[in-house]
Image (spheres, grey):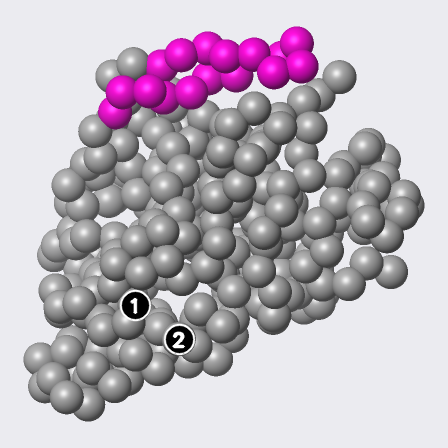
Amino acid sequence: MLPAGASFTILGEKGNWWKVSSGYGTGWVEHRFCMINLPDVVPSIVYDATNAYASRYTSSGKDIPGITGQALYQGKVYNSRFDEEQFLMPVLYATAKKICAAQQKALSQGNSLKLYEAYRPYATQQAVVKALTALAERDPEVKAGITTKPWSMTYFINTGYSNHQKGFAVDVSLVKISRTETRTTGGHTYLVPVDYQEYEMPTPIHELSMAAASTTGPGETTLASTMNDPAIALRDYFRKAGMTPLESEWWHFNDYAARTLAGGRTSTGGFEVTRCRSAAPG
């Protein structure tokens, strides 16, 4: 049995199983329990794991000491599949298929998803919780931004285990593409946006306060007045792909069906992903 967080190379797929090789040997794993690195299978998305080099977390527009601007975990390594350094963006395999569907819809309208975060280690989650809690205790404006009813802090940064640790959540924005390139790996071609402009969204990414809410409250479907056309389009792409928008963050989408498929046996985020075992197809 592979331990949680073990990296491997997928050698083949048969039904619900992957044949994989790793430092533990070669064998078969049920892919409903496994994450796959999104850049390997959906290279047309724009990837920017800011938490891996300069976190953009703020609250009520204010920096969170010890978090904002910091690298919170390792997230960029050499990927031999594309012969370049790339961000690591693992999600559950079932979730990856839905993100691909959302991206295809975006591409059909001249847009692309811009993925800021997929898997997030639990240690990072708790570091943000601790720092934001301390800031809110000192700053009434920050406290009001995360505790004014009907909201509470856990809607903006889960104080327990986040769906990011479990592998079925992503933080994503939207860009307008002006130019793409077609590239090749292992005899296969793929599309890469090379010139693009990120749309103005309701708030900057990772603004942890009710200013970032996509609806008027928890469990509500009425959109917040700040939701603009690009944010609504992004929401539409993911909803049609079978993922669920988070009411408190316009950028966050969950794949609850993937959680059900895994029977609740999902990651708790007790590891960092620091290696890419991908290889060019062939």
The residue type indicated by label 1 comes to Ile
Question: Residues at badges 2 and 1 in contact (C-beta under 8 Å)?
Answer: yes
Residue under label 1: 67
- Decide if residue 144 is on the left or right side of residue 264: left
Disc 1 residue crowd, few under 14, some 14–19, many 20+, Cα 10 Å: many
Q: Earlier in the sequence, mark 2 or mark 1?
A: 1
Asked if residue 218 can be seen in this view, the reply is: no
Q: Which residue is pictured at 30% across the width and 68% down the height? A: 67
Under circle 2, the secondary element is helix
Count of all numbered marks drawn on residues in the image: 2
Asked if the stretch drawn in magenta spans residue 195, the answer is yes
Q: Residue furthest bottom?
A: 137
Question: Label 2, on which residue?
Answer: 127
Q: Magenta residues, as a range?
A: 180-196
Residue 205 painted magenta = no
> Can you give x and y, in whole percent of width and height, for residue 175 in the image?
27, 32
Q: Nearer the viewer, residue 116 or 239?
A: 116
Above or below for 251 versus 260? above
Residue 131 x, y percent position in the rendering: 30, 79
